[in-house]
């Protein structure tokens, strides 16, 4: 297949691009590099031993989007591009609605005009809001609690509506739980700008000495050890989930939602412990107040993806921490380390 990958230079996009290349697909990446670097593309090409066509462009530039489609005939699009920081979305909601929602509308216009109607979209478990009805099935009502989450919910609605209006569309809405880890080579991984908000990259930066201790947000939740429980999923499992979705959509039309999670929850303390084991030293942590908006627990009912896509997550938390650490210690300053 010839696949357009928006946001393909980013964390999940780069791992998925590598899997696509390894499966023999032709890939064009469209990314404005607002949260990524070209170095990830260089390394993906090295690992795959194949080239990726890279187009630097912004989804908010409708003519740039149209010109990508005019130059090629794509079988499918995987749409990762967007902004993803919850706190930033609360502070600057317009930027988030514009980039995520308007950016997606421009992409859909481009696809429609070019007659490309197979799409896999990066949604998020954040659309379930504060629901703790675990394991969370896809059928739950969507109830995002912040602007970032609402952009995902709105895009899901838009995609569902266009597929109802025109039966030629085939659309996969992938609701990721908590991505972590890196490619086993340690050459590509997550490269957060500034201080990471997410637990695993923060723990990794403590392990590498960039921060003194992990702040554990809340130890009074109704969970066995009092800390929040999440469904951490290896980024390579996620990447493989995209290929499974592409294959499923090949001979079907309609809009489908799938949770991509392991179905297993791990607490904050369990993550810190797993990481400590990998680095063979204690990772310092301190208890801090709960973070506003956090649910006590969230993990996936992963049965739809298992039954329909024949996909399950294969890598456990220990592997996620080991791979994340392998990437972190060989690239202590992310992709900048090599520049
Ligand atoms: P990322 O920031 O590493 O990747 C996003 C990519 O999109 C970046 O390379 C960025 O430069 C690009 N981009 C942003 N705005 C753009 C624009 N206007 N035009 C073109 N390119 C643009 O993030 P990620 O972790 O790889 O996430 C990928 C997708 O998955 C996002 O849509 C995100 O919301 C979603 N998601 C991520 C997580 C997570 O925790 N990482 C969880 C659930 C869903
Ligand atoms: C995990 C657990 C924290 C940091 C977020 C987004 C979600 C999705 C994935 C994009 C929680 C605790 C964290 C720290 C801590 N992204 N924690 N100390 O909040 O489940 O999900 O990322 O779609 O939309 O909301 O992930 O990694 O931030 O937190 O104690 O320094 O770790 O309280 O229990 P979260 P997270």
Image (tube, rainbow, N blue to C red):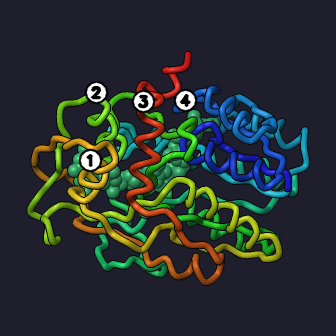
Residue 99 visible in the shown view: no
* Disc on the earlier residue, 2 or 3: 3
- Of mark 1 and mark 4, the one earlier in the sequence is 4
The residue at 60%/44% (across/down) is 81
In this rendering, the answer to whether 265 lies above or below 188 is below
Q: Nearer the viewer, residue 76 or 202?
A: 202
Q: Tell me the distance, in whole angstroms, between the alpha carbons under discs 3 and 4.
A: 10 Å
Q: CA distance from mark 1 to mark 4?
A: 32 Å
Q: Position of residue 62 (x, y in %)?
A: 73, 37
Return the x and y of residue 214 as percentages of the image width and height: 20, 41
Which sits earlier in the primary sequence, circle 1 or circle 3? 3
Q: N-terminal of the two: label 3 or label 4?
A: 4
Name the one closer to the observer, 273 or 155. 273
Q: Please provide percent x and percent y for residue 23.
A: 78, 55
Q: How many marks?
A: 4
Q: Which residue, as the protein is rendered here, is positioned at the far front?
A: 280
Q: Do residues under tags 1 and 4 come within 8 Å of each other at their CB atoms?
A: no
Question: Does the residue tagged 4 have its C-beta within 8 Å of any atom of ligand 1?
Answer: yes
To which residue does mark 3 refer? 193
Task: Find disc 1 in the rendering and name its residue.
Answer: 276
| Distance in Å between CA atoms under marks 2 and 4 | 23 Å
Residue drawn at (63%, 30%), measured in percent from left and top? 32
Q: In 3D space, how far apart are the residues under numbered discs 2 and 3 (Cα atoms)?
A: 13 Å
Q: Residue furthest top?
A: 339
Q: Which mark is residue 27?
A: none
Asked whether mark 2 and ligand 2 are closer than 8 Å, the reply comes as no
Q: Residue at x 45, y 60 (%)?
A: 233
Q: Nearer the viewer, mark 1 or mark 4?
A: 1
- Mark 1 element type: helix
Q: Quadrant of residue 137?
A: bottom left
């Amino acid at each position: 297949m010839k696949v357009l990958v928006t946001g393909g230079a980013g964390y999940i996009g780069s791992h998925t691009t590598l899997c696509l290349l390894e499966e023999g697909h032709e890939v064009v990446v469209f990314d404005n590099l607002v949260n990524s670097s070209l170095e990830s593309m260089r390394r993906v090409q090295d690992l795959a031993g194949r080239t990726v066509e890279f187009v630097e462009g912004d989804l908010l530039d409708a003519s740039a989007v149209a010109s990508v489609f005019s130059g090629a005939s794509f079988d499918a699009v995987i749409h990762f591009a967007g902004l993803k920081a919850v706190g930033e979305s609360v502070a600057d909601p317009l930027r988030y609605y514009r980039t995520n929602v308007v950016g997606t509308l421009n992409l859909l216009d481009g696809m429609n005009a070019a007659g490309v109607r197979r799409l896999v979209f990066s949604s998020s478990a954040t659309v379930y809001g504060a629901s703790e009805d675990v394991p969370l099935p896809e059928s739950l009502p969507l109830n995002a609690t912040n602007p970032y989450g609402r952009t995902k919910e709105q895009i899901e609605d838009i995609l569902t509506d266009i597929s109802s209006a025109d039966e030629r569309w085939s659309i996969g809405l992938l609701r990721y739980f908590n991505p972590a880890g890196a490619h086993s080579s340690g050459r590509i991984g997550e490269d957060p700008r500034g201080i990471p908000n997410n637990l695993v990259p923060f723990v990794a930066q403590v392990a590498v000495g960039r921060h003194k201790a992990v702040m554990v947000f809340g130890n009074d939740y109704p969970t066995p050890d009092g800390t929040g429980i999440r469904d951490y999923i290896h980024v390579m499992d996620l990447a493989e989930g995209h290929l499974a979705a592409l294959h499923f959509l090949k001979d079907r039309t309609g809009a489908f939602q799938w949770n991509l999670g392991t179905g297993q929850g791990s607490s904050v303390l369990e993550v810190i412990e797993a990481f400590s084991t990998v680095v063979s030293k204690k990772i310092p942590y301190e208890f801090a107040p709960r973070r506003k908006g956090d649910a006590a627990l969230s993990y996936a009912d992963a049965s739809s993806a298992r039954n329909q896509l024949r996909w399950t997550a294969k890598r456990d938390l220990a592997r996620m921490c080991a791979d994340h650490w392998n990437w972190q210690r060989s690239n202590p300053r992310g992709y900048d380390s090599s520049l």
